Structures are given as C-alpha cells and as structure tokens.
Image: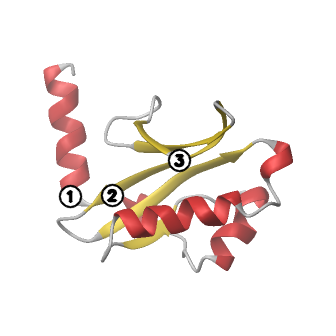
Amino acid sequence: MLPSFAPEGAGEECLLLVHIRKVVGRVTYRACEECAKGVITGVVLDEPFRDCGLGTRALSHLRSQYPGVTWSTTLDKRLTRDLLHRMRIPKAAGGGNCSHVRSAVVATARHGS
C-alpha cells in the first residue's frame, strides 16, 4: 500500500494497492485531522482482488494511519456497498466535505497548484 495524491481532485489523497509491482486498486479519500473526520470517495479493485480481503486491509490501513478519525463515505455503488457496510463506514451527509478541506481546495484553486 502506497500513499499518493489523487489525480481527480484537489484535497483528495489516494492509497494505491500494489501486488507484485503492479497497481491493482486504490482507495481515494479526504481526511481532516483537525475535525477528526475522513471521507472515502472511491474504492477501485481489479477483478481478481475483489474477494481476497484486500479492500478490508486497505480500509484498516487507513484507520491505522489516521487514529481518532471517524470515517464515512460518499459511495453507493453495489461493488463497494458490502465492503463499507462490513467495515461499518456510514454514508456521509452533505457530500462529506468539512470546512477545512473546502478551504484548502479553494486556496489550491486560487494559487493554481
């Protein structure tokens, strides 16, 4: 598991799931340690790795990297619903952005970074 910045959105991070030097999945998320909230915005796993526990390990890894952070999700896809339910990660209310993450996204957009 390798941390990375998410290519899709400012303020998001990504946990790349690697098997034998090949990326086989990723978890995209936003975490704010200031307000102790995290939001999982994407989970992608290659087909052969969907039922081997890799998703569970990845979400457990996130929880260990951000102790004290309460996680929720914006996802409602069939493929990820069971995983998030097993991990007791509820649906986020209102898109799941805290004011700290929104401020960072606006600042990044203004500076063109």
For marks 1 and 2, the one nearer the N-term is 2
Note whether 30 is above or below 104 in the view shown: below
Residue 103 horizontal/vertical position (percent): 17, 46
Q: Residues within 10 Å of mark 2 (few under 14, many from 20)?
A: many
- Label located before the other in sequence (3 or 1): 3
- In the rendered picture of this protein, how many numbered marks are placed on residues? 3
- State which tag comes first along the sequence, 3 or 2: 3
- SS at circle 3: loop
Identify whether 70 is placed above or below 81: below
Q: Is residue 58 left or right of residue 5?
A: right
Residue 34 drawn at (x, y percent): 17, 65
User: Tag 3: residue type?
Assistant: Met
Q: Distance between the residues labelled 3 and 2?
A: 17 Å
The residue at 53%/68% (across/down) is 60
Amino acid at pointer 1 = Ser
Density class for disc 3 (Cα within 10 Å; few <14, some 14-19, many ≥20) is some
Q: Could you tell me if the residues under marks 3 and 2 are in contact, i.e. CB atoms within 8 Å? A: no
Classify 52 as above or below 18. Answer: below
Q: Nearer the viewer, mark 3 or mark 1?
A: 3
Answer left or right for 65 relative to 79. left
Amino acid type indicated by mark 2: Ala
Look at the numbered disc 2 and give the secondary structure of its residue: strand
The residue tagged 3 is 1
Residue highlighted by disc 1: 99
- Front position among marks 3 and 2: 3
Residue under label 2: 31
Nearest to viewer (mark 1 / mark 2): 2
